[in-house]
Amino acid sequence: MIKFKRNRLSLLISLSPSLVLAGVALPGMAQSVDGSAAEAVEEIVVMASPIRDSQKAAIDAKRDADNNVDVISADTIGRFPDQNLADSLGRVPGLAIERDQGQARYINFRGAPFRYTSLAIDGLSIPGAENGRVPRFDSFPSVITSRIDANKAIMPNMPGEAVSGYINISTFDPFAQSGWAVSTDVGLGNQQLGDGDIEKLALRTSWSGDNFGFSLFTSENSREQTTDNREYGIERDANGELLVNELDFRSYKVTREDRAHGGRFEFRGDGAVERVFVSTLYNEFQDFEERNQFVFDFAGGADAVGAPQVSGEVGENQFALVGRALEYGLYENSTFTNTLGADFALGEWLLESRINFTETENIMYLPMPRSEGGFVMASFDVSDLYDPAVSDLVDFATQTPVGINDIQYSARGRLGMQIGSEMSIDATKFKLDAERDLMLFGLDATVKTGVEMDSREADGYGMVLAMGEFPAEINIADYATDKAWDSNFSNGITGATYYDNKALRKAWADVAGGLNLTPNDSQAIRLEEDVTAGYVMVTTRYDWGNLVLGARAENTDYLSEGPTGNFEDSFTHVLPSAHLNVDLAEDVKLRMSVSTGVSRPTYSEWRGDDMVDFIQSTVTAGNPELDAEESLGADLALEWYAGDASLLSAGLFTRNIDNVIYAQSDYIPGDAYLPDVGADGWVYTQYINGSNGKMRGAEFNAIAQAADFLPALDGFGISANLTLLDSEFETRDGSRHSLPGTSDSIFNASVFYEMEGFSIRLNHQYRDDWLSTTENVGMTDYWAEQQRVDLSVSYDLPTPVLGADVTLYANANNLTDEQDVRYTGDESMPNQVENFGRRYLAGFRVNF
């Protein structure tokens, strides 16, 4: 990668020899000008053997691709019990899921931070809904797509910011089926913990004639669930004995809804104008959350009376300060993208032009009545750290037993707390691509070139916390119900019941004349970014395969506004790449590639001022002078097409990454920062650049149909992949850490059987521990290993019903009732454990 910044030239010439094999065969197609799959295999149309048909199409497409790309078809998605696209992508070799309250949300592409993945809709990259860079996959339901392309070896016609991967979501093509077509998917289910309802509805219709076609689709999903959560403040004393400083019990009643609507209107001509279309897609995710929370501060209770704090796993009659929080809030994100496109045949050239307008929003608002200053005697038992207990509550003042809902809190401890953040991004993109075939040095070749202009404006504010006095005329105790907490834990808090948080919030809003959160100037984020890119690439075909050579240049201009001034900068990256595809034999292919990339800071990191939280005495410093992260890497893949619908592959990859962005936190005295405020001290967090980042790994994939090896077992098959990963980077003080998101190993396996319309698939997903974030002191917070076992069963009715093909299906998720755990340092020190139970869904699909 060659980088120009402020007229200073630097040539990155260090490339660690690396081999990348990401040999994965999933439904895919040959690449078009914009890097998305060609339309020849737009959807997998299944008959008697849907799993086998999908895998065969995948293997055929993989063999023809010019780069290392995994493609998931609509039918493959439909045959898994997936809630959203993150679930689906988590089955691809090298891709791992990060969940929120049990639901897939983010993708760690080859163990990389979320920001290293670029997301596109129909070949046009869009801003990440979170901080401009981070794709959120929980808002994209699986049923709206015709396929997903997961590109691992990045070509010049793909965004340079795809350091670890480039994911392209293709919506439905109205010309995939001539005439009228209607399909629907209806499902009902149950979330076991809390007995929550699950509803699923999808409808798509399309029509196409000789020259004109359109498609329309809508999707609505709703999931009610309970998440039972335990959080901890524990440490070890000088003798290695456990100190239980704080136990935090939470029960979340959650309703998560996602919806998507869109369509395409398209004209296809026979002359110079080959295609003109307009497409639109709106998708939205909303998380309505009720939190019931009790915090027992044993360290604070002992300190309040000057008593020594007991050590050990069990403590009886210990002093404890108690806090309570009762929240009803909302998390939501949305993407609204609209594209006008036209394709032209001008002599020997094929031109594709696109104009796109995209709006994203990411909003969090959590109004939370808090009660502080409760004082009790209580016993705790953490002999099972994953199932703590608090019992035997005694009111400190009266020395009488007290129920959890009858604790008396300090009059000064009635607080109305509001937490929020918000960011909206408006993006305008123009893209023009051209390609033609020609003879180059006596060889068949294809030249592709293009330009792209992407302009974005971000506006919003970072995390804001406002605290005031809760209205005295509202008696919170009146909102307690007699409904006990839903829980999979054996222990907990004796007598804990839910509050009517919705009614409590309404009463608060009525008394206060409405609730609102007003950020101060230091919390605002206002940023403008313009990226202008151009590329050229040449594919030369030989008897033994092909060679793709090219480069992409991206110029970035940005302006970061702050209350004390603005900061602007401009820099250019030149990103070369090379891809060699060799047919070693009729059924064996070798792929080698070298590629470069760039990851720009998120908008929160790039903002032009410090965000000051006067309540908690914390400062989060934006840094508009951050350098973009730069990567240089290589891939090697070996693929054996072992049968008509079977594939074995193995490979290696590496990425060297410079300027790794991380957050460093320090404690500074109050007189060193804003001394007029009078704070004792501040926790000061600043985004800075580290160095010497590395990602490397090996991927192994097997897709095997028994019919290709043992015809007597026709109908049986397996699909399994294993990824081994390693990553690290160096901070400014010389310490080394893994990149957030890197598990040492990721494993997926499916066993399936299908025959005469019936199919059953049992799937297992596993990933081991990984660093959850770099935004904490010491970077010691980890997710513990996670696994999921899911089952999907379907049956295609043998005869049409009123002229329609009907499929009945049933899905079961998290069959082994797993819980998710986070810890600090090592697994003996958990800081969060949460349960959510099993999930069941049954329904039918109808296709006319």
Image (cartoon, rainbow, N blue to C red):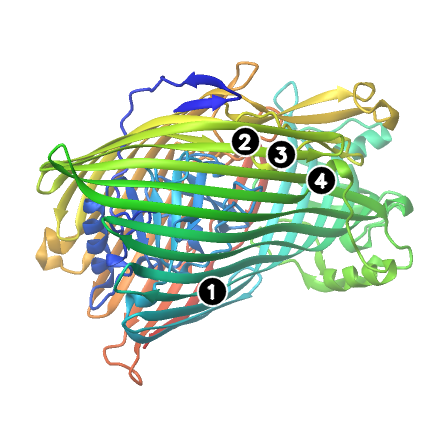
Q: Is residue 659 above or below residue 428?
A: above
Amino acid type at mark 4: Ala
The crowd level at tag 1 (other Cα within 10 Å; few <14, some 14-19, many 20+) is: many
Q: Say what secondary structure mark 1 lies in.
A: strand
Q: Earlier in the sequence, mark 1 or mark 4?
A: 1
Q: Say what secondary structure mark 3 lies in.
A: strand
Q: Earlier in the sequence, mark 4 or mark 2?
A: 4
Amino acid type at mark 1: Gly
Marks 2 and 3, how far apart at CA: 46 Å
Q: Where is residue 409 drawn, in percent x and y?
A: 85, 47
Q: Say what secondary structure mark 2 lies in.
A: loop
Indicate which disc residue 559 carries.
3
Q: Where is residue 322 drawn, in percent x and y?
A: 78, 43
Closer to the camera in the image, 401 or 764: 764
Q: Where is residue 531 drawn, in percent x and y?
A: 50, 37
Marks 3 and 4, how far apart at CA: 14 Å
Indicate which disc residue 524 carries.
4
Viewer-nearest of labels 4 and 2? 4
Q: Earlier in the sequence, mark 2 or mark 3?
A: 3
Amino acid type at mark 3: Leu
- Name which quarter of the figure residue 11 lies in: top left
Give the residue pinned by disc 2.
828
Q: Earlier in the sequence, mark 1 or mark 3?
A: 1
Give the residue pinned by disc 1.
262
Does residue 20 show up? Answer: yes
The crowd level at tag 3 (other Cα within 10 Å; few <14, some 14-19, many 20+) is: many
Q: Is residue 238 above or below residue 228?
A: above
Amino acid type at mark 2: Ser
